[in-house]
Amino acid sequence: MAKSHEMEHPVNAFGWAARDTTGILSPFNFSRRATGDLDVQFKILYCGICHSDLHFVKNAWGFTQYPIVPGHEMVGVVTEVGNKVEKVKVGDKVGVGCLVGSCRECDSCTEDLENYCSKLIITYCGKDVDGTTTYGGYSDIMVANEHFVVRWPENFPLDAGAPLLCAGITTYSPLKHYGLDKPGLHIGVVGLGGLGHVAVKFAKVFGSKVTVISTSANKKEEAIEKLGADSFLVSGNEEEMHGAAGTLDGIIDTVSAVHPLAPLISLLKTDGKLIMVGAPENPLEVPVFPLLTGRKVVAGSSIGGLKETQEMIDFAAKHNILPDVEIIPIDYVNTAMERLLKSDVKYRFVIDIGKTLRQNN
Ligand code: NAP
Ligand code: ZN
């Protein structure tokens, strides 16, 4: 008989889990493995809430296994390291993002693209090498192989910085990979949420002119005055959208729901690139003619490898790029999920795990 979640491993752990497609989270006892030779154990202090957590707890993509402890933007302080660990020591600040394992041998892995390994082990709702389920950062402690642990830069805030582990790398990586990080380019960011607002910040530091394309007219003032965007288009306003046709070199599309691509493609210049990072649960329609007539590209990107994630965190610390966050206690998590669904957050919820997660929650 399979062992219970509490008995699977020797180390007691506690978090909040969803048990079914309602996605409602509640306290959950489980266990973590003992710290292996190459493992790092850390006390989780903060964990961001990514829209993927929401897709997952509701089984929107169809492969959720319950119970699920979400959270792949976790940061904390190292409490124990294995004999062979060289990267960090007890007391260091660290983070874990969306992946905790990969084969380390395939072409993707050897090119530092563990995120594209076919044997990728995701941080929660994944199958670990020993066949047990992985659990995420809405919990008190974490154990991960040092390769998948990111060193936290000195004096870089843990709370506001946590979302960079997913929202940060997911936007930084395609901007770099698709050559959209060159100064003077005009970049569009679609959807001003967790990913979108970080994309704006990176693109500005790269020296781009940035246009936000949003369904929410009420985000305009802040996008321009606070986030530094140069202009703002309301996607439902046809006149505004037509006026901006053919102006963008590239677009990062972070939208979490099904939405029309044709109006976005029309914003691109010849050779422009529309990069999808949002992951709606149903397919989107791609109109082909506007691609042909402008030699335009529609492509995708998923998080980033560990080397690039470390590079991104160090870059963010150097340039003081920090997500705008709303810090919440763990018992607010279900309300936060409801608000996230309504795009009612500026711009990322971060759970204060260290101060609010208790066994008796
Ligand atoms: P989020 O904070 O909820 O932001 C998504 C934004 O999309 C919203 O703020 C909203 O912006 C816009 N939006 C929402 N519903 C819309 C609709 N029906 N039509 C048009 N626009 C809509 O979510 P997030 O955490 O940034 O994640 C965004 C998406 O990326 C999710 O699908 C998530 O699963 C995915 N994701 C992918 C990766 C990857 O590796 N590729 C990594 C992380 C997350 P406005 O109010 O400005 O319109
Ligand atoms: Zn995420």
Image (cartoon, rainbow, N blue to C red):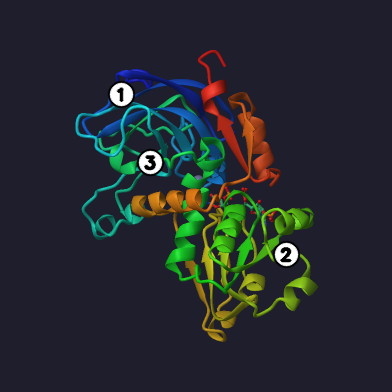
State yes or no: Cβ of the residue under disc 1 lies below 8 Å from any atom of ligand 2: no
Please indicate, yes or no, whether residue 254 appears anywhere in the rendered image: no
Q: Position of residue 4 (x, y in %)?
A: 36, 20
Figure quadrant of residue 228: bottom right
**Picture coordinates of residue 237, whole percent (x, y):** 78, 67
2 or 3: tag closer to the N-terminus: 3
Identify the residue at image location x=58%, y=26%.
330
Seen from this angle, which residue lies furthest bottom?
293
CA neighbours of label 3 inside 10 A, class few (<14), some (14 to 19), many (20+): some
In front: label 1 or label 2: 2
* Between discs 3 and 1, the one toward the N terminus: 1
Callout 1 amino acid = Ala
- The type of residue carrying mark 3 is Arg
Q: Earlier in the sequence, mark 1 or mark 2?
A: 1
Q: Which mark is residue 223?
A: none
The secondary structure type at the circle numbered 3 is strand
Residue position marked by numbered label 2 in the rendering? 232
Left or right of residue 336, residue 91 in this image: left
Q: CA distance from mark 2 to mark 3?
A: 35 Å
Cα–Cα span, label 1 and label 2: 54 Å
Q: Nearer the viewer, mark 2 or mark 3?
A: 3
Label 1–label 2 contact, CB within 8 A: no
Contact (Cβ within 8 Å) of mark 3 with mark 1: no
In the rendered image, residue 134, in percent from the top left (x then y), is placed at 37, 34
Residue under label 1, please give it: 2
Quarter of the image containing the C terminus? top right
The residue singled out by tag 3 in the image is 151
Residue 235 against residue 338 in the figure, above or below: below
- Camera-side residue of 175 and 32: 175
